[in-house]
Amino acid sequence: MDVDEDVHVNPHLVNAAPAKIESIDVSLAEELSAIRQKIERLRLDREKTEKMLRQRDLVMETNLKEMVNRGEVQKLLEIEVDRLFRLKELKSSCMVRKCLFGYSENANSAELSFLFFAT
């Protein structure tokens, strides 16, 4: 039996091969379409992620600048507090000496030396 006889006996054999090729083409086209959609979704997700990361980077950079600025202000305030503390100690020291020297004019030298060593 050759091909011509087969065709007459079973007419579906001639059309079977092109239908199979068409179904493969359709299947490949569907897969290609699905892959393209997936690539597009991934691209959109990447863009969203990059945008979010840029925003977070800006927030972190702003916070870092603020922290550096606060650190500088705190350092200046600590220096000012130290100066005020030393000024207070100096003022107290001057007041003690002023009292001692004012008292020493009326007192003898023994009382004066006692006051210096007692403080």
Image (cartoon, rainbow, N blue to C red):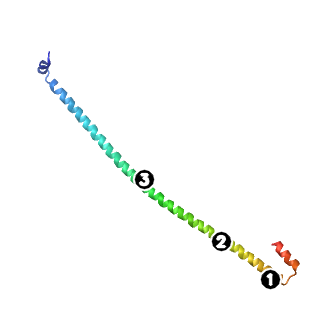
Left or right of 8 in this view: 68:
right
Of the image marks 3 and 2, the number of the one nearer the N terminus: 3
Of the image marks 3 and 1, the number of the one nearer the N terminus: 3
Hey, what amino acid is under mark 2? Arg
Question: How many angstroms separate mark 2 from mark 1 (CA)?
Answer: 28 Å
Disc 1: which residue: 102
The number of numbered badges drawn on the structure is: 3
Residue 12 screen position, x and y as percent:
15, 25
Q: For the N terminus, give its image quadrant.
A: top left
The circle drawn on residue 53 is 3
**Point 63% across, 68% down: residue:** 79
**Up-down relation of residue 109 to residue 12 (above or below):** below
Question: Residue extending furthest bottom?
Answer: 106
Q: In the image, which is nearer the foreground, mark 3 or mark 2? A: 2
Residue 42 screen position, x and y as percent:
35, 45
Hey, what amino acid is under mark 3? Leu
Left or right of 48 in this view: 20:
left
**Point 69% across, 71% down: residue:** 86
Of the image marks 2 and 1, the number of the one nearer the N terminus: 2
The circle drawn on residue 83 is 2
Q: Nearer the viewer, residue 31 or 71?
A: 71
Q: For the C terminus, give its image quadrant.
A: bottom right
Rendered image quadrant of residue 29: top left
Rendered image quadrant of residue 118: bottom right
The local crowd at label 3, few if under 14, some if 14 to 19, many if 20 or more residues have their Cα within 10 Å, is few
Rendered image quadrant of residue 111: bottom right
Mark 1 falls on what kind of element?
helix
Hey, what amino acid is under mark 1? Gly
Mark 2 falls on what kind of element?
helix
Mark 3 falls on what kind of element?
helix
The local crowd at label 2, few if under 14, some if 14 to 19, many if 20 or more residues have their Cα within 10 Å, is few
